[in-house]
Image (spheres, grey):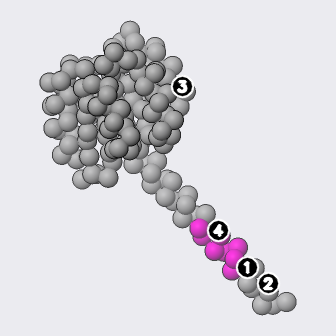
Amino acid sequence: MRKDVKILIGLSDRRFLKAVVQILGRVYTVQSGFRIRDFAKKVHSFTPDLVIIDYQFSGMKATDLYQGIEFMHPNCVFVVRAESERLKIARLLWKRRAMDYIRKSPRVFDFVQDVNKVVRYIIERKENEEHILQIKALKKSISELKMKLRKATS
């Protein structure tokens, strides 16, 4: 179980979203929203690791939503669910930062598989960041120990 990964999902299709939340909620901490106002509140209070939205969500485009989320949560991974003709725009968003896009599919199973791929990336990134912090702490301890040894021998 990876309940430590927090996912916020905003999709236009309520039935699809409900099925996705039911499945992903068994493994991750998942919140969802149908309207932009609810979604914006959850972005503030939930502090997600992953945000997934439809390219066109509740009257706003993903590009507009991304700018606000990027500012509030710079470490959050942002994923756009787009139809094939909108993939070009999703790819442009992806080039701006470590984001991804998911091709819109009517099958919940395909969507969940794509989300799991992105979550694996998030988990690996978190583990790498923890290792980097541990290495920095070790280097600091080693340098402090070297300084103490120099003082003791001089």
Dots 1 and 4: beta carbons under 8 Å?
Answer: no
**Residue 15 visible in this rendered orientation of the protein:** yes
Does label 1 or label 4 sit earlier along the sequence? 4
Q: Is residue 140 magenta?
A: yes
What label does residue 95 carry, if any?
3
Q: Position of residue 91 (x, y in %)?
A: 47, 20
Q: Is residue 10 left or right of residue 64?
A: left
Percent position of residue 60, x then y: 38, 17
N-term-proximal mark, 3 vs 4:
3
Q: Which residue position holds label 1?
A: 146
Amino acid carrying label 2: it is Arg
Numbered range of the magenta stretch: 137-145
Q: In this picture, is 56 found above or below 68?
A: above
Residue 129 pos. (x, y %)? 51, 54
Q: CA distance from mark 3 to mark 4?
A: 34 Å
Q: Amino acid at mark 1?
A: Lys
Separation of residues labelled 3 and 1 (CA atoms): 44 Å
Residue located 30% across and 19% down the image:
58
Q: Looking at numbered disc 3 in the image, what kind of residue is underneath it?
A: Lys
Q: Is residue 101 magenta?
A: no
The reply to whether dot 3 and dot 4 touch (C-beta < 8 Å) is no
